[in-house]
Amino acid sequence: MTIEQICQALLELKRAGMQEISLDGGEPLAHRHIDQVVARLIAWGIVVRMNTNGILVPKKLEVVRRLQKVKISLDGPEAQHDAMRGKDAFRRALAGAEAARAETCR
């Protein structure tokens, strides 16, 4: 979808009464328009939350600091999480959580 199509769909939801949204499914921080989507939602007064694997958080802090809440997905202890998501995924998820906390808990 183009950014215009995304915003039009979100605007229809807003007009239908949406006041809050949780962005997830796949990895929302990997979406090429995530910064614009979050900015638009916030400008409309929508509360924005996000579920993420945490890996891109340090690179997308400008988006993360605008969110009401960030949830980092962990699939269990380090060995289990890495077995499901790849080598060092657990460590990178925790680094993302720490970066998000440092930005939002000032």
Image (cartoon, grey):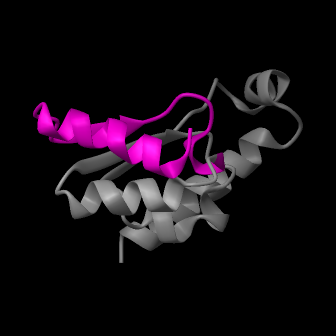
Viewer-closest of 105 and 7: 7
Residue found at x 59% / y 50%: 29
Q: Position of residue 97 (x, y in %)?
A: 55, 54
The quadrant in which residue 16 appears is top left
Extent of the magenta region: 1-30
Residue situated furthest left in the rendering: 17
Compared with 71, 66 (above or below) is below
Residue 86 is left or right of residue 65, and the answer is right
Residue situated furthest right in the rendering: 87
**Picture mark count:** 0
Q: Where is residue 18 in the image (x, y as percent from the top left)?
A: 17, 36
* Quadrant where the image shows the N terminus: top right
Viewer-closest of 105 and 68: 68
Residue found at x 15% / y 41%: 19
Residue 102 is left or right of residue 60, and the answer is left
Q: Where is residue 70 in the image (x, y as percent from the top left)?
A: 42, 48
Instruction: Specify whether residue 75 is painted magenta.
Output: no
Viewer-closest of 56 and 5: 5
The quadrant in which residue 86 appears is top right
Instruction: Specify whether residue 17 is painted magenta.
Output: yes
* Quadrant where the image shows the C terminus: bottom left
Q: Position of residue 79 (x, y in %)?
A: 80, 27
Residue found at x 59% / y 64%: 60
